[in-house]
Image: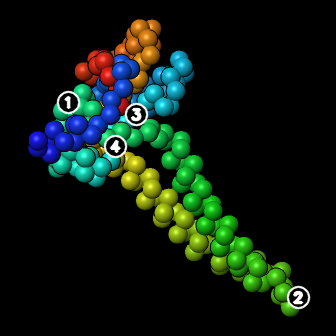
Amino acid sequence: MDDTDEALAKTTVIDIPEAVGVFDRFEDLQQAYYDLRTVGFSRHDLSLLGKEEVLKEKLGKSYWRAEELEDDPRAPRAAFVSEDAIGALEGSLAGGFLYVGSMIALGAMLTPASTLAASIAAVAIGGTPAAVVGVLLARRAGQKHKDYYAHQIEHGGMLLWVRVRDDEHERLAVEILKGHSGRDVHVHDWSE
């Protein structure tokens, strides 16, 4: 038994059909995701290809193409993260660091001997560097998200798997995936 056979033997699949499509643009993938959610698919029914590190660990490949992984039950899965969620994360990081830095500076200046002007200056001086750190971390998080999708596009496209529980959901999933420029849209009779 080689490594591939061993990895396949350790993979658990369930007897629920799954639609799959490949997308070349993030905007199309995102819109397909939102439309699937709108017609009643749970976020737990939808998955994307996992990070490259996990892919290499699980499959031992340094180079892959999307079409090789569409129907491979060993392909690692990940949850969809919307641009809105990334924007909220970026805002939280930048704002959170500004708040913490300002509160630390303000706490240091809240003594009976401090003046209002000194307290305001301390908040500005303490909050600004913290906000810069927050912005840098936010940009890094946003860039990692963009790199994740760009890397998949370089390898043939972004995969979206959709569990379908009956014929009607299968029809809806295929229609939505194709309707948003999904290619090679098809259904296999199992899911991970």
Q: CA distance from mark 3 to mark 2?
A: 57 Å
Q: Is residue 51 above or below residue 127?
A: above
The residue under label 4 is 50
- Tag 2: amino acid: Pro
Q: Secondary structure at mark 3?
A: strand
Quadrant in which residue 92 is drawn: bottom right
Q: Kindly give the residue lying farthest to the left in the view shown.
A: 2
Q: CA distance from mark 2 to mark 1?
A: 69 Å
The answer to whether the residues at label 4 and label 2 have Cβ atoms under 8 Å apart is: no
Labels 4, 2: front one: 4
Residue 14 location (% of width, % of height): 36, 26
Q: Which tag, 3 or 2, sits closer to the chain's start? A: 3
Q: Is 50 on the left or on the right of 30, as rendered?
A: left
The residue under label 1 is 67
- Tag 3: amino acid: Ser
The residue under label 2 is 112
Quadrant location, the C terminus: top left
Judging depth in this view, the residue of 114 and 51 nearest the camera is: 51
Q: CA distance from mark 4 to mark 2?
A: 55 Å
- Tag 1: amino acid: Glu
Res. 182 visible in picture? no
Res. 137 visible in picture? yes
Labels 2, 1: front one: 1
The answer to whether the residues at label 2 and label 1 have Cβ atoms under 8 Å apart is: no
Label 2 crowd bin: few (<14), some (14–19), many (20+), radius 10 Å: few
